[in-house]
Image: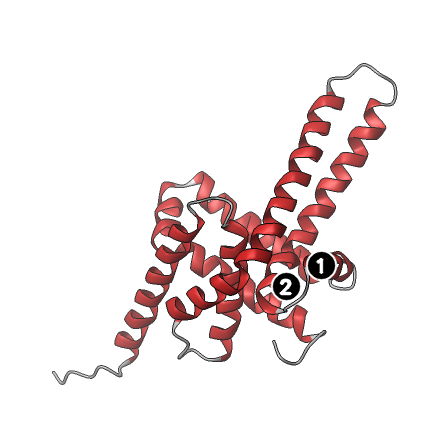
Amino acid sequence: MKFNPDSSFFRAMGTFASFVLVNLVFILTCIPLVTIGAGLAAMQRTMMLYIDNEATALTRTYWRNFKASLVLGTQTWLTVLALAAVFIFNISFWRSSPLWFATPIMIVMIIATVVLLMIVEVLFPLVGTFKNSYRQTMKNAALMVLPSFGKVLLLIAIDAGALALFGLTRIGRAMFVIFGFAFWLYIKAFVEKKLFTKYSDKV
């Protein structure tokens, strides 16, 4: 048998190894928790670049994007956490309240939570892809939701599938630890590229 390092098998193994390594680096950079936003932004941008060029060095590119997204990614992540905490607290508080106006307020908070979730779907890819101020990035994310409503729903569906796989099966959790976070964001990157191409030809 002739050894051929350029065979499809060895190329596939090389790709798998690259995903495993960048997945590990992603997990390590997200351990401080406050850096999760920067990690998401960096990985989603890295995977968009990888789709364009499979020769992209995933780990090196991720690390470069992580450093570039660290400040804005952390700011936006902390904002999302704060808003989510406020909305979830209010839903829990008003659900058990006997006051007549409790239900309308709870409904408003539920709607606000759903809107926040939809904004988040485009927020971190925006952080990783475009260089804007904090205020402009938040504004752009909010404005992009309705024109891209179908794609945003598709991104939410991908997240729901990933969450179910992670939460309901041991093998799913093992996959995420090994390579799953990278692969999950790789799948989302196809949708995000189509979404952003509408606004820029440099995606």
- Which quadrant does the C terminus fall into? bottom right
Please tell me how crowded label 2 is: few (under 14), some (14-19), or many (20+) other residues with Cα within 10 Å: many
**Most distant residue in the left direction:** 1
Rendering coords of residue 159 (x, y %): 56, 51
Residue 96, quarter of picture: top right
Rendering coords of residue 75 (x, y %): 61, 51
Q: Amino acid at mark 2?
A: Leu
Look at mark 1 in the image and give the residue it sits on. Answer: 141
**Residues marked 2 and 1 touching at CB (< 8 Å):** yes
Please count the marks in the image. 2
**Most distant residue in the top direction:** 98
- Which quadrant does the N terminus fall into? bottom left
Please tell me how crowded label 1 is: few (under 14), some (14-19), or many (20+) other residues with Cα within 10 Å: some
Front residue of 184/36: it is 36
Residue at position x 59%, y 48% in the image: 77
What SS does tag 1 mark?
helix
Residue at position x 60%, y 45% in the image: 78
Look at mark 2 in the image and give the residue it sits on. Answer: 126
**Most distant residue in the right direction:** 100
Say if 176 sits above or below 47 in the image: above
